[in-house]
């Protein structure tokens, strides 16, 4: 049962300049606010009392955050407010980045994808069976760092303030594909603008999850031309719809100039506090099967699973190999 949501003020700036000016003013006053795009992740947390912002600032009136631009060189700019349903159904984008469109189409359910944004998906909160419960349930089963407590029910040795303090799982479906595509984030704050590769964005902690400042806005995602990179994305879930990834695997292959496999790349979601990402150059391996073995070993060794999901932790870990090898088969490489 959810508690009635706390009251909050609501604002809807009409331009990026207005938004940034407002953020500067609010941060100087120590403001307690949250930015909302589709609010499909934020609102359930407010309803469960996990987040209690005094003010909600909607991004939906900011035109600079919307729209998709295609450039002649094959690169694209995706506004952070691009809705996942639009992304999944965009025929032009499907030609350039089919796996990104497919991953967007695997998020939640059709009604949620109509509102959910790509920016919000990259920033979706990490999840754990302790924090993602009603306030009543949390009160009965004990607290955790993220709910303001001083212990973690999963990792007894974890200490508040010492990273990684929280083992809540990273769950974005689009992040692994965007990592393989070498996406770059355009970020704007009262201090100005910066471009940050997605590969440098996430941190190894379920609470301090990324390097975005509280007064910083994700404006757009820049994608270079896919340039022959083929990606397969699949996720482990109980149901076909509505479920966050218990494990998500993106596997990428790029041919060299001779047409044989030149690079294998791999990114994971649903396991660990941040998305793992690895690249394997063909020159370092005897053949494609050896590259695939190396990818499975790297992912397996890095993955620490806890009993924090519907699936048993060992099963999720075993499925990493299975998902990587099935993706390789679909991409037509290795055994
Ligand atoms: C039933 C259900 C099932 C779901 N299943 C999945 C799933 O399978 N896979 C998955 O990945 N997600 C899932 N989600 C989570 C969520 O719907 C998606 O991740 C969605 O893409 C979030 O986008 P949003 O625009 O609604 O984000 P919001 O809820 O608006 O925002 C999420 C976070 O990002 C911040 N934020 C958003 N946009 C910006 C911006 N431009 N700049 C700075 N900060 C920003 C917000 O402040 C907030 O902290 C599910 C949610 C529900 C309710």
Image (cartoon, grey):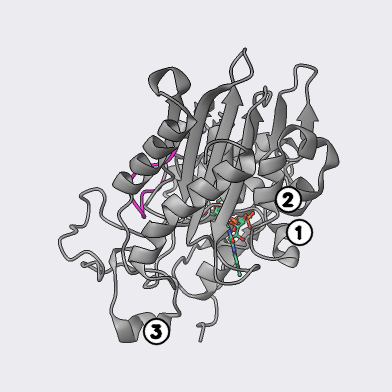
Res. 186 in view: no
Location of residue 7 with respect to 17 vertically, above or below: below
Which residue corresponds to mark 3? 137
Q: CA distance from mark 1 to mark 3?
A: 30 Å
Q: Residue at x 39, y 39 (%)?
A: 293
Of 229 and 132, nearer the camera is 229
- Is 291 magenta? The answer is no
Contact flag, marks 2 and 1 (Cβ < 8 Å): yes
Q: Secondary structure at mark 1?
A: helix
In the rendered image, residue 135, in percent from the top left (x then y), is placed at 42, 80
Q: Secondary structure at mark 2?
A: loop
283 sits left or right of 176 in the view: left
Which numbered disc, 3 or 2, marks the residue that appears first in the sequence? 2
Location of residue 117 with respect to 155 vertically, above or below: above
Q: Residue at x 56, y 57 (%)?
A: 235
Contact flag, marks 3 and 2 (Cβ < 8 Å): no
Which numbered disc, 2 or 1, marks the residue that appears first in the sequence? 2
Of 222 and 238, nearer the camera is 238
Of 332 and 130, nearer the camera is 332
Q: Secondary structure at mark 3?
A: helix
Res. 316 in view: yes
In the rendered image, residue 50, in percent from the top left (x then y), is placed at 44, 69
The dot on residue 114 is 1
Q: CA distance from mark 3 to mark 2?
A: 32 Å
Location of residue 89 with respect to 98 vertically, above or below: below
Q: Residue at x 58, y 37 (%)?
A: 178
Per the rendered image, the range of residues in magenta is: 200-209
């Amino acid at each position: 049962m959810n508690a009635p949501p706390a009251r909050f003020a609501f604002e809807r700036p009409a331009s990026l300049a207005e938004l940034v000016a407002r953020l500067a003013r609010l941060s100087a006053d120590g403001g307690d606010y949250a930015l909302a795009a589709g609010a499909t992740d934020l609102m359930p947390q407010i309803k469960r009392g996990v987040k209690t912002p005094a003010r909600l600032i909607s991004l939906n009136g900011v035109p600079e955050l919307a729209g998709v631009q295609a450039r002649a060189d094959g690169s694209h700019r995706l506004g952070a407010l691009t809705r996942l349903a639009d992304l999944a159904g965009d025929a032009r984008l499907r030609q350039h980045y089919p796996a990104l469109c497919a991953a967007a189409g695997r998020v939640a359910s059709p009604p949620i994808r109509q509102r959910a944004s790509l920016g919000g998906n990259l920033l979706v909160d990490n999840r754990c069976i302790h924090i993602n419960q009603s306030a009543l349930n949390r009160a009965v089963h004990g607290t955790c760092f993220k709910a303001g407590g001083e212990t973690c029910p999963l990792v007894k040795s974890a200490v508040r303030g010492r990273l990684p303090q929280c083992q809540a799982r990273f769950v974005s479906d689009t992040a692994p594909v965007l990592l393989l595509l070498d996406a770059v984030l355009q970020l704007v704050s009262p201090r100005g603008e910066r471009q940050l590769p997605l590969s440098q964005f996430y941190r190894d902690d379920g609470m301090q999850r990324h390097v975005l400042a509280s007064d910083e806005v994700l404006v757009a995602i820049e994608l270079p031309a896919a340039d022959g990179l083929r990606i397969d994305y699949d996720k482990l879930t109980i149901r076909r719809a509505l479920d966050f990834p218990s494990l998500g695997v993106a596997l990428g292959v790029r041919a060299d100039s001779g047409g044989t496999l030149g690079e294998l790349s791999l990114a994971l979601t649903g396991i660990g506090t941040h998305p793992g990402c690895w690249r394997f150059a063909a020159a370092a391996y005897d053949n494609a099967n050896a590259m695939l073995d190396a990818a499975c070993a790297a992912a397996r060794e890095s993955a620490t699973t806890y009993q924090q999901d519907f699936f048993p932790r060992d099963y999720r870990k075993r499925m990493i190999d299975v998902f990587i090898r099935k993706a390789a088969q679909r991409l037509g490489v290795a055994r």
